[in-house]
Amino acid sequence: MTSAASPRPSNTPFFIIGCVRSGTTMLRNILRLHPNLASPEETHFFRWSDPFGSPGYRHVVTKNPVLRRHRELDGISEAEFETMLNDSTSRADLCTRYIQRFAEVRKPTAKRWFDKSPQNAYGAAMLAGEFPRGKFLHIVRNPVNVVASLRIGKVMKMDDLVGACSYWNEAIENLALLQRAYPKRVLTLNYEAFTVSPLDGIRDVLAFLGEPFDAAHFADVVTKEVRHEDAGILTDEELAKVRSLCQTGRLMHGYGTEEEMEAERQREATRLKRREAHAAASSAPPDSMSSKPDAGPKAVRKVAAPPRATKPAAEGREAKPKA
């Protein structure tokens, strides 16, 4: 489908993923201003757990009203999409066909495509595997403002605090794992810092992507941090609950109080010392583990083994748009 006059390498895409209501749309719209880059609305092709090619997967990607509206905005007819879906053999194949066709229709001069689907965070590992040269932009926003934005419901609504916090926590957890696995392929951005100094943020993003930066392309960009923390949308009790439910990710991304962050730094220092001690002990030769000379064989006192536990330890958490 890609024309020879405007090649778009299918092996160099990038993906904006993360929690909803965290600035992903803002970031996509800014990067669309770059002459080399093209992105559709949202694909969600890696979001759902149904295997590609299964009736469940086909049903959700063809019948979901949000995705049908996105295709209308992208200039891709339902008949075209059906053909793409039938001809594709994987999610990556469908994603490539779809966005290359979008670029041909909407921005034929673009040389590189990207996708912004926040909920593709649920399929981040598969994305990384199916696009082995792909890169990821993860934009993070204070969970209190994310949860309050979901309570307002301007774009999507979630009143339940546990559900709203789970949007944030699950994205943070999935992408923390992705970054540990592929540290050179993931760039994490702070929403608050980006909105304060967008040109610096854009420059960092383009350097990470290997794209040229020209401030003239972004001369009309205006950003503003949107805060809901003090707007009365959440009660003091609800604010405390959000901070508690999101504590691990909050501290990971610097959204704690000074006291919390200092305590976290001390805990991390302790964890580092333990890891270093464990590594040193593991690498030591066996005969250096004890300074005492061998005293020869000793009598061994038999001790009855404790009874085995019979009760296994408890083990153990995607919100889908309505199809």
Image: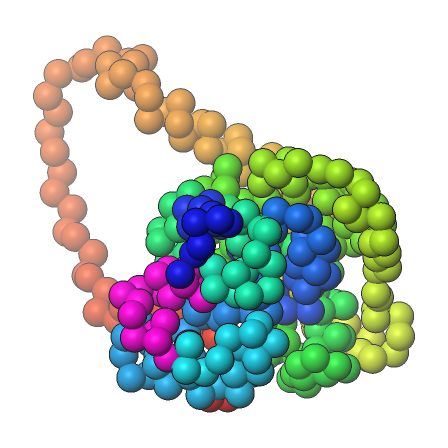
Q: Is residue 316 left or right of residue 300?
A: right
Q: Who is closer to the viewer here, 82 or 180? A: 82
Is 249 drawn above or below residue 134 in the view shown? below
Q: Where's residue 3, x and y in %?
A: 44, 54
Based on the displayed image, in which of its 4 quarters is residue 282 positioned?
top left
- Residue 94 painted magenta: yes
Q: Quadrant of the N terminus?
A: bottom left
Q: Where's residue 50, x and y in %?
A: 33, 76
Q: Is residue 20 left or right of residue 142?
A: left
Q: Where's residue 257, x and y in %?
A: 79, 52
Residue at the far front: name it. Answer: 5
| Residue located 12% across and 33% down the image | 300
Which segment did they paint magenta?
81-98
- Magenta span: chief secondary structure: helix
Q: Is residue 11 left or right of residue 102?
A: left
| Residue located 75% across and 38% down the image | 214
Q: Is residue 1 left or right of residue 151?
A: left
| Residue located 19% across and 61% down the image | 307
| Residue located 65% across and 40% down the image | 206
Q: Where's residue 261, x and y in %?
A: 73, 46
